[in-house]
Image: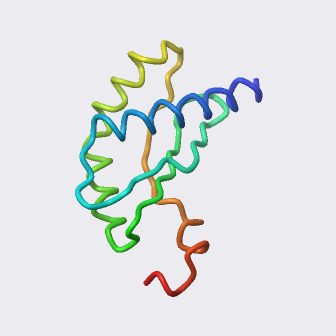
Amino acid sequence: MHYRVERVNNLIKEELGYLLEREVEFPHALVTVMEVACSKKMERALVYLSVLPVTKSEAMLKIARQNQARLQFLLLKKMHIRPMPRIHFEIDPHTYEDLGSDAF
């Protein structure tokens, strides 16, 4: 079971990264899927996004969340897995640590 969750995490990360690049417009920012963490029962998937420049993180997170239902539908259509975890977007907390305090 654990191996399946890991495989689904990697598949969602890859496909969602492609969908975010092709289907959602993020004005003047680079948005990257850093990590996906599915729950053990495959009910929920936390998608951690990295945004550059960091100052636009909240605005880009809002755009991602506005497109969440459409991205969920496209992901389901593309992946054909059951159950398909519900995606939820968050900003990757490690992004801020890696950039240091100079990024703010």
Residue 2's quadrant in the figure? top right
Place of residue 55 in the rendered image (x, y in percent of width and height, measured from the top left): 35, 74
Residue 60's quadrant in the figure? bottom left
**37 in relation to 61, above or below:** above
Q: Nearer the viewer, residue 38 or 17?
A: 17
Q: Nearer the viewer, residue 17 or 45?
A: 17
| Number of numbered discs | 0
Place of residue 18 in the rendered image (x, y in percent of width and height, measured from the top left): 42, 34
Which residue appears at 34% of the width and 32% of the height?
71
Find the residue positioned furthest to the bottom.
102
Place of residue 58 in the rendered image (x, y in percent of width and height, measured from the top left): 33, 65
Residue 16's quadrant in the figure? top left
**What colour-coding does the image apply?**
rainbow
Q: Is residue 56 left or right of residue 14?
A: left
For the N terminus, give its image quadrant.
top right
Which residue appears at 49% of the width and 23% of the height?
84
For the C terminus, give its image quadrant.
bottom left
Place of residue 32 in the rendered image (x, y in percent of width and height, measured from the top left): 46, 50
**26 in relation to 94, above or below:** above
Q: Is residue 96 left or right of residue 68?
A: right
Q: Is residue 5 left or right of residue 81?
A: right
Which residue appears at 57% of the width and 42% of the height?
36
Find the residue positioned furthest to the right.
2
